[in-house]
Amino acid sequence: MKEQFVPYEISLKLKEKGFDWHCLAVYMNGEFQIPRGFGMSIITKEHVDVLKGKAVLTPLWQQVIEWFLIEHNLYIYIERDGGWWIVRIKDLSREDEEGVIDIEMKNVFSHCFDEMSKARQVAIEYVLTLI
């Protein structure tokens, strides 16, 4: 299930950029955890604040993509065209086509999920440089 969540390095970058949405997981002292017990089913920024820097909110990949859209007007979508994954990032605050940035990725992985996950990670890492 860990593969459904962003890696530690991206979680740290998201924290720097102000990500504070509720999550199902954290990295506690750098280790991935889904807390159990004490009625915790979601983790908030307030939970992390109590832990004084030991924990970092760890969102699902899709949460990050939605956060970019809602908080920063940046829309990420990924499509397949033949042997290529095309990553498109559109700045919705711009009304013309100049708001579209394309990143093309060569198909270098043997499994579709691996290809998609790599495309998604590259897109998120790129958008983190824009905000």
Image (spheres, rainbow, N blue to C red):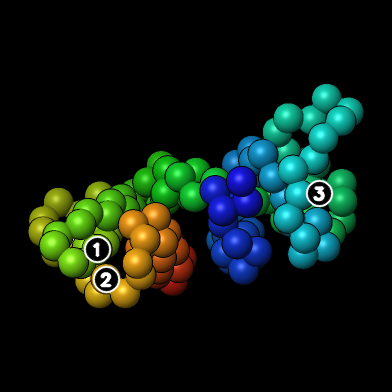
| Pointer 3 residue | 49
In the image, is residue 87 above or below residue 92? below
Look at the numbered disc 2 and give the secondary structure of its residue: loop
Residue at left offset 22%, top offset 63%: 86
Q: What amino acid type should be assigned to the residue bearing mark 3?
A: Asp
Relative to 105, residue 4 above or below: above
Q: Secondary structure at mark 1?
A: strand
Instruction: Provide the residue designation for mark 1.
Output: 85
State whether residue 87 appears in this view: yes
Relative side of 46 to 15, left or right:
right
Mark 2 = which residue? 107
Q: Amino acid at mark 1?
A: Trp
| Residue 106: x %, y % from top left | 25, 74
Q: Residue furthest front?
A: 110
Q: Residue at x 27, y 71 (%)?
A: 107
Mark 1 Cα within 10 Å, few/some/many (few <14, many 20+)?
A: many
Inspect this view and state whether residue 127 appears: no
Closest to the observer: 76 or 5? 5
Q: Nearer the viewer, residue 50 or 108?
A: 108
Instruction: Count residues near mark 3 (Cα–Cα under 10 Å), then give few for <14, some for 14-19, many for 20+.
Output: few
Give the percent coordinates (x, y) of residue 6.
56, 56
